[in-house]
Amino acid sequence: MPLKIIRTLSTHTSSFKFTQNMSSSTQHQSSIVSHPTHHVEYWSSSSTYNTLVVVPSLSFDCDLLRAIKAVSHYEERLLYNLILLKNPNCRIIYLSSLPVDEDIVNYYWDLIQTELHEKIAFDEVRPRLTMLNCSDARPDIPLIKKILDRPKLVNRIKGMLTDAEHSCLSVYVATEKEEQLAKLLRIDFLAGNVKSHHYYGTKHGSKELFSQCAIPTPPYTPLVFSEERLIEEICKLMRSHKEAKKLVIKMNEGFSGEGNALLCLDPLREHIQDLEQIIGPCLENMHFIGNGMTWAEYRRKIQTLGVIAELFVENNGSNPSCQALIDSNGDVVIMSTHDQVMDDQIYLGCCFPADVSYRTKLIEYTKRIGEGLAKEGVQSHFGVDFLVGEPQADSNEVNIQAMEINLRQCGTTHTFVTMKLLTNAVCDPKTGDCVSIDDGHQKCYIASDNLCFDAFEGLLPQDVRDYEHFPETLHFSRSTKTGVVFHLLGAASQFGKIGIVAIANSENEARELYDKAIPHFLEYATLEKRQSTQNSENLCAQGKNDLSEV
């Protein structure tokens, strides 16, 4: 892909109808237990929610978050929910640490303009959207804690919920703090059993569930919390798998590849009997995936977060994933499959859908994993990361290994739902194909959160909005249901970083659109700079001509 990438980088129709005029006699059973008719896929036609409280809190380890460029703008990832405002019965309360630029909000209105827009101005839609913020830029405190530390803000939100019976809390990742907020607001929380939710979203919890569900996964060690125990378990793993060339050490609560480290075993293989004495210095010299991570910092994290080690599997370049959700009935709904673009185990972007040669196997495994999670009381979005290894001897089947479960909205969730809502696509849970009910065309896309160019620095959200009017623009068209959609608009000006989704009617067309869109948007972004340079050159040339005449 022609892009400069930094090392940071988821049977229902999308044309839903929010229920209105619901019977007031229906009794709200519990503030956090979903009704039988309520679904985690709150944007679907079967949803009975009409008010969404969106809290995009990145409730992860703050030290690992710092490695992600422009992470302060990742609260914008859940802004795809604003597309739901095209339904006249939808209300959204969106919270953030700092104010979201109004031009970013307007960008999503630009996306959903339809014939309705000619009759209803945005000024009439805007009252159904409430943007609240904590006026708190501290990067080491997650948004959810900032909200809970402001009881007046919580009460203000509660006062806005005129129909708590049909309101829900949508979050990026579910923790006990998000659950606490749902209880305070007395609205449904789309997570279910939070303790199970947290456990099976860790590296070790994922591995345990894979084993329970008979899903292939690389051999791994128990969870340990000290350097000494890590050395002990690595030695056991090496001696039982003498052919191994590398190990991956994984922070138990890492994400997006941050918190991983690679340990090369070549220097150790000749000393298999004396590993305990020589492996320590090798740990200090591991290749740490996290930006700026050192062994001293990593060792400290082992004591608080814990780590596992697993065999490194040589793959064929394919890192697919499958996204699904578990609804309040415990049913597993397959949402999407993707081929992920990785750089040194860091997620950069994705292609939808995944390769057809292993797509059905991804769906089969993910369905089985989801059923295992449902038995533990989990109700949530989730994604499973896989790896396609080298073919196994005497087998014609694709060698797919499950790597980890992401019990949260994944890096692919916002891109997929954006495409689904904008194109009115219906996805076949058996094949993974998506077709627009408006034009009957298959929908595919290529997406990235990590387009990083110096030329993007200084671009304001208004500038990104104006790209739609640039000559030969490739921006998303409501008539063709194809084109590019941007996200993370707020990260461009300071960090030169932006996200993109290139939506088309086939995989080849999506690739072609993606490859054209990046240089075309670069041309737009640098227009004034190039004009200024040309003017300067013209002035210099004119000055030389004047001198020659003299």
Image (tube, rainbow, N blue to C red):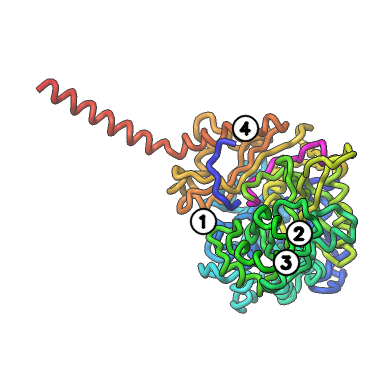
Tell which tag, 1 or 3, sits nearer the viewer.
3
Between residue 496 and residue 63, name the one nearer to us: 63
- Please provide percent x and percent y for residue 430: 88, 42
- Residue 311 among magenta residues: no
Calculate the distance from the C-alpha at mark 1 to the C-alpha at mark 3. 26 Å
Tell which tag, 1 or 4, sits nearer the viewer.
4
Element class at badge 2: helix
Residue indicated by mark 3: 174
Calculate the distance from the C-alpha at mark 2 to the C-alpha at mark 3. 36 Å
Horizontal arrangement in the rendering, residue 232 relative to residue 285 (left or right): right
Tell which tag, 1 or 2, sits nearer the viewer.
2
Tell which tag, 2 or 3, sits nearer the viewer.
2
Q: Earlier in the sequence, mark 1 or mark 3?
A: 1
Element class at badge 3: loop
* Residue at image point 79% right, 55% down: 241
Residue indicated by mark 4: 513
Q: Which region is colored magenta? A: 345-360
Q: Earlier in the sequence, mark 4 or mark 2?
A: 2
- Please provide percent x and percent y for residue 242: 78, 54
Tell which tag, 4 or 2, sits nearer the viewer.
2
Badge 2: few (under 14), some or many (20 or more) residues near its Cα, within 10 Å?
many
Calculate the distance from the C-alpha at mark 4 to the C-alpha at mark 2. 46 Å
Residue indicated by mark 2: 238
